[in-house]
Amino acid sequence: MNAPLPAIEVTPRDLSAYRAGNTGIDYVHRFESGKPGPHVMINGLTHGNEFCGMVAVCHLLDRGVRPKIGTLTLSFANIAAYQTFDPTAPFESRQITHNLNRIWSKAWLEGEDDSIELRRAREMRPAVAEAEHILDIHSTSQDVVPFWVYPAFARNAAVAGALPRPAVHLVMPAGLGSGTPLIQHGAHAGAEAPGAALVVECGQHFKQSTSDLAVEVALDFLGHYGLIDRDVLPPALPPRRFELLRTHVVQHESFAFVRPLIGFETFAEGELIATDGPVEIRALCDDCTIFMPARKAIVGREGVYLTKPLR
Ligand SMILES: [Zn+2]
């Protein structure tokens, strides 16, 4: 589990110039075109060390991109965690206390608990709730191919399927099973959502290519809705799709994979993938494909996602 640290090709930049937005919420900016059209939100830094979302949102802010129609909201979410980045411990600044991408339920947002992430989610809640279409930009700890993640609603599949990249889709028929992500807040949780809400995982956190992809996907997303002029080509090939079967949350310090895994390895039905104290995590189907194996197992955090390829 003590893998060498990856190269840090992209480092945090000072975002203080973007602190004061125009929404009354720090680091949340809204631009109205004055014309009818969709309200699109592009959010980065839900996890503090996932710099590609920061790069994509900065790309739009730095260039003064404004919507031709509708409304554009641009935001940086977990600034507090982002600001703790330490290149000698680059995985530590993902979050301070809570995973900001698992607390978007009414129960957490209106509950008694307090943390930096809960305060930030409560602060950002109106901005998230008002957006019709949301792109939440993420990256992975391991260097694997980029992929979409979204609840299995046709409205989400239609948008992800219309965009040229990435070409892998992780579809969640029953949510994450480990909390409520930003893209499932409020109306976006159910059948009545006003639009699509997608996570894009753009590659390894600290690689330049990951940030480059995040910029392209953000521009494609805005182009798809007509907020900017952009030719969005259809995908060259049909996507590879996987369905989330189970999210395993680590229960014991002794959690260990049977061998080093980075994601996208496949297992035969019943084959052992990991052990977590006395619990055996076994493949749930043939070609059971794992996503996002924890780089370091932390009790209470996700250990691995088990998925089934869709044919
Ligand atoms: Zn993330």
Image (cartoon, rainbow, N blue to C red):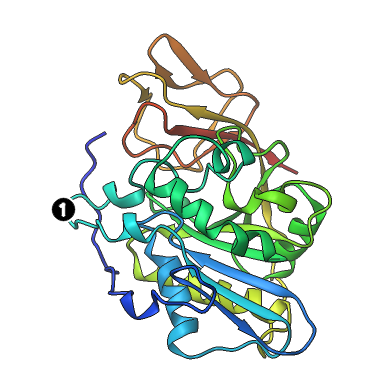
Task: Farthest residue to the left: give it.
Answer: 88
- Tell me if residue 85 can be seen: yes
User: Residue 301: x and y, percent?
Assistant: 42, 33
- Tell me if residue 167 can be seen: no
Mark 1 lies within 8 Å of ligand 1 (Cβ measured): no
User: Residue 91: x and y, percent?
Assistant: 29, 48
Q: Residue 277 versus residue 222: which sits nearer the camera?
A: 222
Residue at the spot 59% in from the left edge and 74% down from the top edge = 73
Residue at the spot 68% in from the left edge and 84% down from the top edge = 227
User: Residue 1: x and y, percent?
Assistant: 27, 33
**Relative to 248, is 167 on the left or the right?**
right
Q: Residue 150 versus residue 310: which sits nearer the camera?
A: 150
184 shown above or below 228: above
Residue kind at label 1, given as amino acid type:
Thr
For the C terminus, give its image quadrant: top right
Residue at the spot 72% in from the left edge and 53% down from the top edge = 188
141 shown above or below 265: below
Residue holding disc 1? 88
* Classed neighbour count for the residue bearing mark 1: other residues with Cα under 10 Å, few (<14), some (14–19), many (≥20): few
Quadrant of the image occupied by residue 72: bottom right
User: Residue 98: x and y, percent?
Assistant: 41, 41
Q: Residue 94 versus residue 224: which sits nearer the camera?
A: 94
**Number of numbered markers:** 1
**Relative to 116, is 194 on the left or the right?**
right
Q: Secondary structure at mark 1?
A: loop
Q: Residue 108 versus residue 291: which sits nearer the camera?
A: 108
Residue at the spot 41% in from the left edge and 18% down from the top edge = 275
Quadrant of the image occupied by residue 274: top left
